Image (cartoon, rainbow, N blue to C red):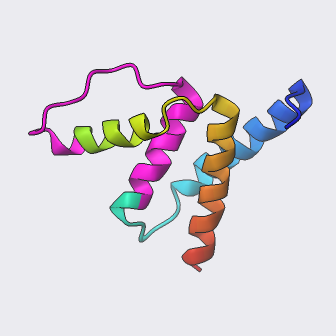
Amino acid sequence: MNNSPENNSELDIEFNECVVKYIKLINLNLNDKLHMYGLYKQATLGNINTLIPSLFDVHNRKKWESWNYFKGIDSNSAKRKYIDYYKYLVDINQ
């Protein structure tokens, strides 16, 4: 994949557009929401840098696990995966 600044800029624009549009999707199941959350965090912040929440903190633990699942993926790859998964969600929710 070509990582020239122009291509990265185009990727960033498409990613940001998908982030805004994602919020408008309805009827998503929890697994899809967590998948998008993990990709978003990996794309914007990189590898997870927080301690795993307690087993009793189910909500935050699921979010942590979703982000941790994508550990090691570079920002541009995570953005591309986010875009692709967003498009998949749009297709199946039509």
Residue 92 versus residue 33 in the image, above or below: below
Figure disc tally: 0
Q: Is residue 28 left or right of residue 89?
A: left
Q: Which residue is drawn at 61% across and 48% down?
A: 82
Q: Which residue is drawn at 56% across and 66% down?
A: 89
User: Which quadrant holds residue 65?
Assistant: top left
Q: In this view, does 91 lie to the left or right of 66?
A: right
Q: Is residue 94 left or right of residue 23?
A: right
Q: Please state the horizontal and vertical placement of residue 66, each as a whole percent of the image.
A: 39, 43
Q: Please state the horizontal and vertical placement of residue 26, each as a whole percent of the image.
A: 45, 68
The magenta stretch spans which residues?
Answer: 32-59
Of 40 and 52, the residue lying toward us: 52
Residue 65 versus residue 29 in the image, above or below: above
Q: Quadrant of the N terminus?
A: top right
Residue 75 versus residue 86 in the image, above or below: above
Q: Please state the horizontal and vertical placement of residue 91, each as a whole percent of the image.
A: 63, 74
| Residue 89 located within the stretch drawn in magenta | no
| Residue 55 located within the stretch drawn in magenta | yes
Of 14 and 20, the residue lying toward us: 14
Residue 49 versus residue 81 in the image, above or below: above
Q: Which residue is drawn at 20% across and 30% down?
A: 53
- Kindly give the residue lying farthest to the bottom in the view shown: 94
Q: Which residue is drawn at 62% across and 66% down?
A: 88
Q: Please state the horizontal and vertical placement of residue 94, each as a whole percent of the image.
A: 59, 80
User: Which quadrant holds residue 50?
Assistant: top left
- Kindly give the residue lying farthest to the left in the view shown: 56
